[in-house]
Amino acid sequence: MHYRDASDLAAAVRDSLPGDGHVVVRGDLADAEAVRSMVDEAADRLGGLDVLVNNAGVYLTHPLLDGSYDQWQQAWRDTLGVNLIGAANATWCAVRHMVARGDGTTGGRIINVGSRGAFRGEPTHPAYGASKAGLHAFGQSLAVALAPHGIAVASVAPGYVETDMTSKELATRAGDVIKAQSPYNRVATAEEVADAVLYLASPGAQWASGAILDLNGASYLR
């Protein structure tokens, strides 16, 4: 499990997991060398890598007609640096471990956590929508490139999910509007997204390689 700043929360999650052997590693995904060190440390402490889940992301508000040109550029750099380039760098590093196993075998799973926003648009968060669209396309490109090595690559595209980051907004009138986007009149739980990721990481999910799985409770259909 990777974290950037929240070391206490990362340790708490690690300690809550059943079994042992869980590893917590630190790294800033916007820093290419930090990504390499983080992935290599994880592989060393775990004895190799089988699965990479690109889940980290930032969600910065930057409407086109508000703010300065410098703010606009910074929002794009910060968002793409983590959501797309950071994921691409983590993947580059992780794949080296997946194809260079000590027993001579290859294989693995890469799951990208994209977003419904890649398809429906993000008018006040355009860099976020673009980064997630790029992440989906990146995953499909690698699904073809890595198939000869037994590595399957797939993506999930959640809508709103109830997390620490969204809980305040979901408790407001705006949150009621967001929930009403789905005919279930709610948003997803983190566990529902995790269940989909767990399937895509499983041995039986190789034939889902290249897929983008919508997880939005029928709030956006395409």
Image: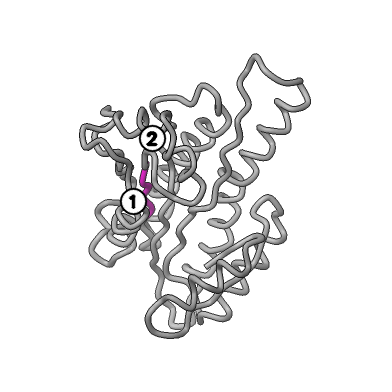
Residue 35 appears in the rendering: no
Asked whether 155 falls inside the magenta stretch, the response is yes
Give whichever of 64, 46 is nearer the camera. Answer: 64
Separation of disc 1 and disc 2 at Cα? 15 Å
Residue 48 appears in the rendering: yes
Which residue is found at the position 56% from the left and 39% from the top?
Answer: 59
Does 121 sit left or right of 96 as displayed?
Answer: left
Identify the residue under disc 1: 189
Give whichever of 27, 47 is nearer the camera. Answer: 27
Does 33 sit left or right of 114 as displayed?
Answer: right
Q: Is disc 2 surrounded by few (<14), some (14 to 19) or many (20+) residues within 10 Å?
A: many
For residue 134, the mark is: none
Which residue is found at the position 68% from the left and 50% from the top?
Answer: 30
The amino acid pointed to by label 1 is Thr
Identify the residue under disc 2: 116
Q: Position of residue 148 (x, y in %)?
A: 37, 58
Which residue is found at the position 31% from the left and 57% from the top?
Answer: 200
SS of the residue at dot 1? strand
Asked whether 120 falls inside the magenta stretch, the response is no
Say above or below: 34 vs 61: below
- N-term mark: 1 or 2: 2
SS of the residue at dot 2? loop
Which residue is found at the position 46% from the left and 45% from the top?
Answer: 167
Say above or below: 193 vs 187: below
Q: Position of residue 45 (x, y in %)?
A: 56, 81
Residues drawn in magenta:
153-157
Does 53 sit left or right of 75 as displayed?
Answer: left
